[in-house]
Amino acid sequence: MAYEQEISRRKTFAIISHPDAGKTTLTEKLLLFGGQIQSAGAVKSNKITKAATSDFMEIEKQRGISVATSVMSFEYRGKLVNILDTPGHKDFAEDTYRTLSAVDSVILVIDSVKGVEEQTEKLMEVCRMRATPVITFINKMDRDGKDPFDLLDEVEQKLNIHVHPMSWPINSGRDFKGVYLIPSHSLNLFESNKTKKADEFISVAGVNDPQLPELIGERNASKLREDIELIDGVYGELNRRDYLEAHTSPVFFGSGLNNFGVQELLETFLELAPTPVHRPAAERLVEPTEAKFSGFVFKIHANIDPRHRDRIAFLRVCSGKFERNKPYRHVRLGKDLRFANPYTFLARSKEVVEDAYAGDVVGLYDTGNFKIGDTLTEGEMLHFKGIPSFSPEIFKELINLDPLKSKQLEKGIEQLTEEGLAQLFRQEPGNRKYIGTVGELQFEVLQHRLEHEYGAKCRFEPRSIYKACWMGGDEDAIRDFMKFRQNNIAWDKDNNPVYLAETQFTLRMTQDNNPKIQFRTMVEVTEAAQ
Ligand code: G4P
């Protein structure tokens, strides 16, 4: 198949949601359509469940399983769909933000009972930063949820995006009758059936079709007429460009658990969603159709077997064709590497691939060459942008409990933070190490892995640090500030200075007192590395 054709049939996306809204269930149903799994329940085992939140060993085990399902690919009607999995657990939110840098669009799942939740807002902020197109799926319509108009308002207000209903629910909960598909004027009637594989659509001649009362009852038909009249008046027709530019999100209503409304979601997604789009590098914009290969690492996953210290680096192909055994330039290290066993995820299990195209993700065995954000090319000096690094929320100091194992501890903490499990800040003098994370869980995971994989013993002492801020702006001002506030300055993994603010108040004061310096709690990884 011609190269352009290969790219134009690819759709690479992620499903995002607040935990429990139904991301895993929806992923599973999409895979059922793609024929990748035969029954529901297959993806579920990958999920970091609520029951496991206090059991980090269980989480590690599940993180291990999730390597195989980090990317799930399937073919549907001639298209090749790559779903990039994002961990639902909020303590691993950083992982999700990084994965979002490797997709071309997202499907956002919202629980109709709970509406827009906190985690969703944060995820959408990241999508907005990159103008990632979003399709919204309002899930759990089989439960008594909020009023659909209220839900649309909530999405617009809280997520700062226009909405465009593509389907419209007829009641919810026990009285849920199904949805009316607005563009195609058809009905999809609901039946609770968790093993159903496809929906059946009934074509009607709009909401004034005389059949309608027979199909859904007089009262429902008249309510639907009113609703659709209002919707037509307010929303008109969807402009695909508004969606692609991330101004407007098409919205579907359904129930993942009942595989209801998923088919129309998938089919519209395949029609509307972008094929692999260009990616910004610090030097220039890289088009997917360029002949030369380029790509970047957005995720690193450790092999959880302690006897094999190797890791898997996940690389998004941005342009050209990636080929097995061909030497590629590791831009940061300035050396050429070749990969004998790269794999993709087209089959149910991972398999070695000969080549991959823009939009694909390949897994590369790594013995310590990669950091998140690294770029591979055919020789050009490119640094892909867009992987965000946020200030951690919790800071603790790493205390070595076994001086004879200092080297192991040093190496372990270096490697584990390169994986993106936590952030490391070093402070001179005294070589103090602060570890920053999003949640408490990572400290348990770190401690356990340092002991079992590196033989190092440590503990973490809480430190009252509110935020780590990267500094930009006037260089002289930054230099003076660093001299003056030495005790609050530390260095990140790329040797960039950060200001460790103790409280929100001191951060505000510091900002006011140093107007020539910008204190930022978010930077792009490439930006930080330069
Ligand atoms: P997540 O990945 O976003 O965290 O959510 P997940 O799919 O695991 O779904 C969270 C819970 O919501 C699950 O119930 C799931 O069965 C349920 N759920 C998902 N979609 C629907 C839906 O359309 N309708 C209803 N009523 N429930 C839905 P659970 O009890 O936590 O898990 P399980 O015991 O059912 O596996």
Image (cartoon, rainbow, N blue to C red):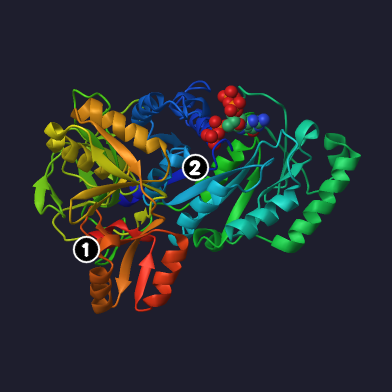
- Measured from the top left, where is residue 483 in percent x and y? 23, 70
Quarter in which the N terminus is drawn: top left
Q: Is residue 436 left or right of residue 91?
A: left
Q: Is residue 262 left or right of residue 91?
A: right
Q: How many marks?
A: 2
Q: Marks 2/1: CA distance?
A: 31 Å
Query: Quadrant holding ligand 1?
Result: top right
Sequence-wise, the earlier of marks 2 and 1 is 2
Q: Residues within 10 Å of mark 1 (few under 14, many from 20)?
A: few
Q: Which residue is mark 1?
A: 530
- Measured from the top left, where is residue 520 in percent x and y? 38, 65
Quarter in which the C terminus is drawn: bottom left
Q: Is residue 411 left or right of residue 357?
A: left
Answer whether residue 98 is visible to the viewer in this image.
Answer: yes
Q: Residues within 10 Å of mark 2 (few under 14, many from 20)?
A: many
- Point out which mark residue 15 bears: 2
- Measured from the top left, where is residue 35 in percent x and y? 47, 27
Q: Residue at x 34, y 32 (%)?
A: 445
Q: Residue at x 45, y 53 (%)?
A: 274
The answer to which image quadrant residue 259 occupies is top right
Whether the residue carrying mark 2 lies under 8 Å from ligand 1 is answered with: no
- Measured from the top left, where is residue 338 in percent x and y? 12, 41
Foreground: 403 or 137?
403
Whether the residue carrying mark 1 lies under 8 Å from ligand 1 is answered with: no
